Amino acid sequence: MKKIDNKKKIMLIISAAILLAGIIVIATLGFNFDLRYQETKRVELFLDKQFEVSDIKQITNEVLDNSPVVIQKVEEFEDTVAITAKDITEEQKNNLVTKINEKYGTELSADTTEITVVPHTRGRDLVKPYIMPLLIATLIIVVYMLIRYYKVGALTVLLATIIGVDFTQALLFSIIAITRIPVGRLTMPMIIVIYLLTLVVLTNVFENKLEKIKLTEKKNK
Amino acid sequence: MKKIKILTIILAVILVAMVAFLGIYTKTQNRMENKIEGYSYAMDIKGARTVTLKVSDGTKTVIKDSEGKEVNDAENLTDEELAEKGYTKEENTYNPEEVLTIENYKKTKEIIEERLKKLNIQNYIVRLNETTGDITIELEENDDTDYIVSNLQTTGKFEIIDTETKEVLMNNDDIKLANVMYSNNSNSSTSTTNSGTSVYLNIEFNKEGSKKLEEITKTYVKVEDKTSDDTSEDADEEDDGIEGKIEEEVDAEPETESEDKDATEKTITMKVDDEDIVTTSFEEPIEIGKLQLTVGQATTDTKTLKDYVQQASNMATALDVENMPVKYEIGENEYVASDITTKELHEIKYAFAVVVLIAAGILCIRFKTKGIISGIAYIGLFAILMLLIRYTNVVLAIDGLFGIALVLILEYIFINKILGKMKTLNVKEAVKESYKEFFIRIIPIAIAVITFCFIKWIPISSFGMVMFWGISLIAIYNFAIFQNLLRIKTENK
């Protein structure tokens, strides 16, 4: 028992340390957002022919020094390429245009090619659509848990569920912040999956406790 | 006999898997076409309409008379004619300097998001450049996107003004809500012939606004012996739609004005975004605080009706939400494909297939012959799930892909549970115990999943729908197919 308690203590200390570190990182550095959600610069080039994204990637790696880029096909005929990067200077734009002209035989002009600024997406705009559904689901789930596991103790179930879910989510956000994993379109689905798996674990714990209580009641009868 | 049964079921599962992953190809017009329905992808996988709204730096010409009142229909007058009449011409910017603040840009962004919600748009990204005020919006590309885009640049400024004096009698502050209503029209009360459905823009005013409306309808009264060009507040009598009415009023105004001069009838003009919508006076006072304007004409044609509904919805949304403090113009408006290419999408499918094969392999290694059956059943469930997603029109977003992964995890756990219990129990009891234990433990997931299915946000509903079909399939498929396979296998011994 002492070993188990020590293990639990160590786990709690480690979790607390991660949470604390996470809070400090979030407060000072914030999250590391994926390129698609940062303020970026974009260039659109009309090639008038089909192209492979991998070919454009080779060119951008050369011109933009292997910095992360997002390459997208534009319009129905996919004959225009949109290149988005953290920063594109005038010189880099000129080089891009030159290399594209060389590769595709186009006559694009750097003068008529604009660098547009793509504004950032706020983190809260990413999270906002998920808040209400998760709150509603959690509320219904808590009510269900209170009804099903009333023998375990309403306060225990309530606190364990709320703290358990919040704790795992906070831990997850802290890990994301500390490890600088880019926050992007994979983040929220990942959070939902962790949220659901947390609920499964909690339900498992409560079910086991309930079974023990039922066994004890049977024995006493 | 039992071997044949097992073989038949396994072959059926393999066939379904082949259909799901490879498709059924038939020759159509000299090319091979896959008859299996394709996937519907959300904008994060497929692509989005990207619209950039730029802060308007345009100007509007305002002609004023000697008293400083705005004069309509004087744009065609030459400078000499203007001078003769004592009119002055001014160039006013749509957006004065004092309006171009970060607070107003942020407010406009919120208004746009509010409008998109009211238009029932279930997936969008709105970005604001706080320096320039430009707003970039990404929307799902479908038949309605053009209507939505046309709505985005309207400021939603509503005014009821005195046609002559240009005094603003009512504005956005008086509106409580605006929505779209329909009515089915019959040719006569005794006839069963349907002349079509009419679409109305219904504007309800708040308490203050209702009082003002009542006053206006008592003041701007229709004078008797009017021509048929006059309009009333009774929407049923209005034949032409909002756009038609502008044309009608352009033709009718000279007559109306001359009649005004003769009969001293006062009229009001309803304006949206500084454009005249209707000029009218009222036969009776309106005490209920509502105005109904017909949009288009009564029609039985579905497409035309849909167009009218779209027009009315756009107008209603613009009026229902606060009007934008800054006027915008559409800059870029283009379809941008997702950076997830078709090749990468195939790679994701192959990755799933590889994971499923590995899981099936692990089952084979752990549970030997039962594991082989389980592995095939596992692949079969994945195949049926993918077919279900296609045929139930589930829109697949990235969240949906995570849903598929979670379903596969749950199924793997479930199969392991059954096979684990079969070490001590027979098939029937093992399956029964496993169902009881497993589904009790995933009730919270089921609750969350059902909640997500009803959410009007595509990524969340995609996850919800995939999980819903996945959990339903786990329940039904394992009972109907997997249990029978195991039963036949163990009885075979």
Image (cartoon, rainbow, N blue to C red):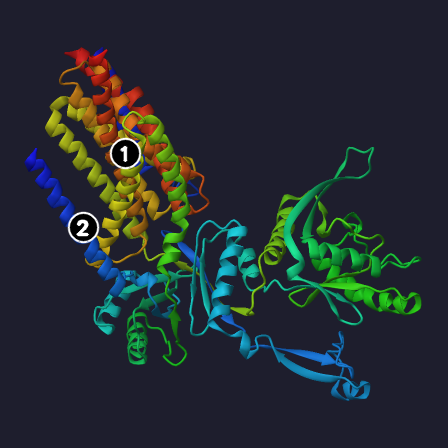
Which chain contains the residue that carries disc 1? A
Number of on-image labels: 2
Q: What amino acid does circle 2 point to?
A: Ala
Q: Position of residue B307 (x, y in %)?
A: 62, 51
Q: Position of residue B458 (x, y in %)?
A: 42, 46
Give the quarter of the figure containing the C terminus of chain A. top left
In the rendered image, which quarter is residue B271 located in? Answer: bottom right
**Of B460 and B469, the residue lying toward us:** B460
Among the 4 quarters of the image, the one containing residue B75: bottom right
Residue located at (75% from left, 85% from top): B78
Q: Nearer the viewer, residue B204 or B1?
A: B204
Q: CA distance from mark 2 to mark 1?
A: 21 Å
| Residue A64 seen in render | yes
- Asked if badges 2 and 1 are on one and the same chain, I answer yes
Q: Chain of mark 2?
A: A
Q: Which residue is mark 2?
A: A16
Specify whether B173 is left or right of B475.
right
From this view, report whether residue B254 is shown above or below residue B1.
Answer: below
Q: Quadrant of residue B91?
A: bottom right
Residue B216 falls left or right of residue B139: right
Q: Which residue is mark 1?
A: A156
